[in-house]
Amino acid sequence: MDGFNLTAVPIEEGMSSPWPNTMSSHSPNFTSKVPEVPVSITTVVTAVIFVIVFIVGLLGNTLVIYVVVRYAKMKTVTNLYILNLALADELYILGIPFLGTHNVLSYWPYGEFLCKMYMTADTMSQFSSTFCLTVMSIDRYLAVVHPMKSAKWRKPQVAKIINGMIWVVSFLIALPATIYSKIQEEFQSCNMTWPEPSTLWSTVFILYTSILGFFGPVVVICLCYLLLVIKVRSAGVRAGLTKRRKSERKVTRMVVIIVLVFVLCWLPFFTMNIVNLVHIIPENNVTTAIYFFLVILTYVNSCANPFLYGFLSENFKQSFQKVLCLIKANAVNTTQITAQDRTKESNVPNSSPRSHAQNGKMQSIQQRVQMEVLESETLKSSVL
């Protein structure tokens, strides 16, 4: 995903910025150079922000992936969907070095093959994230509203198949990014080059990605939780909360908050893109700063999810603590084992239950036996 470049040159007609980190090609001036902002300051600030987001997001999502794969108790249906979401967030975060380099150098240094790979992976990760959240919301609806009927479908094996289908569908939807992304020779930037009429293609692509990648899934998610709330309120009047229902409520609350954070982080960006289709947003320092903030906000969402898991799920919290304290625990265990070995070694001489007096008695008895044996042998020899 070619991010918004504060120092890029203007994009000519027919060349569109890729989704979702740039505006429509209807506004080529929006990506032009900003002379009022010193390039050195812009470069440093951009690099620092990207480095922080990259490190936090990479470590956080790697931790989520590890605990779900490592611990058996974490392999629930919901957690498998969270695993898939963490993979999508990780893939999105891994694009930051390419995006940051592009912004700092103001050109794409990695070649056309990596340009296509980068654009494809980035677009796939966005669709996968949205579809994961949609599936998680549908799963919550089935778990709460139809717990018995959906039991045969809400299994880890089924969740794994659905996760695989999400990536396949995301790849198919992201094919336009694979086909039309290339290095623009005049500007040496990784971007999308649309055929004629380029304006129409660009508009269709923005609507296509906005509807399938955000607004459509959000409608499905809202519908699921609306029906869920109606069902819970009607059932809550007739029956008290059982232990299972309390557990389901906690999981549902976690999924709802994750979805809300996703919407808050991505809604401003997609809204600005849609508005730019209707009315071209003029370029100035304020709009440039706003758009850059909205792009960073989408990456912050991928960084925030691991923290949400830790705060909202006791299982994730305990698993995180186990992993983060693993080195310390190993050091303590090594010290304890060493101390135990030393204790055993020091107790070896005292391991015999007999006292020194008892040992002396045994030695005297052995001497008497030996004397008797010698006397008997002497008698035998004399007889012979």
Image: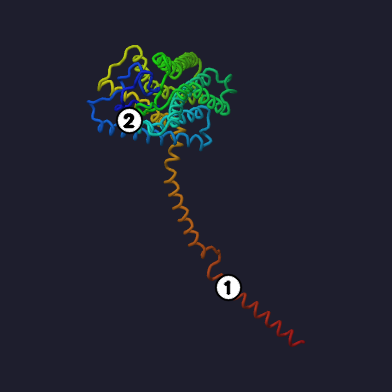
Whichever of labels 2 and 1 marks the residue nearer the N terminus, that label is 2
Q: Amino acid at mark 2?
A: Ser
The answer to whether 234 is drawn above or below residue 139 in the figure is: above
Neighbour class for label 2 at 10 Å: few (<14), some, many (≥20)? Answer: some
Of the pair 358 and 120, the residue shown nearer to us: 120
Q: Which residue is mark 2?
A: 106
Horizontal side of 294 relative to 237 (left or right) equals: left
Of the pair 80 and 126, the residue shown nearer to us: 126
The x and y percentages for residue 379 are 72, 85
Residue at point 67%, 82% (across, down): 374
Classify residue 339 by image quadrant: bottom left
Q: Which residue is mark 1?
A: 361
Tell me the SS state at disc 1.
helix
Residue at point 38%, 27% (across, down): 185
Q: What sort of colour scheme is used for the picture? A: rainbow
Image mark for residue 151: none
Query: Seen from this angle, which residue lies furthest top?
Result: 278
Horizontal side of 240 relative to 279 (left or right) equals: right
Tally of numbered discs: 2
Horizontal side of 212 relative to 274 (left or right) equals: right
- Which is more foreground, mark 2 or mark 1? 2
Give the distance between the C-alpha atoms of the residues marked 2 and 1, in whole angstroms.
95 Å
> Which quarter of the image is occupied by the N terminus?
top left
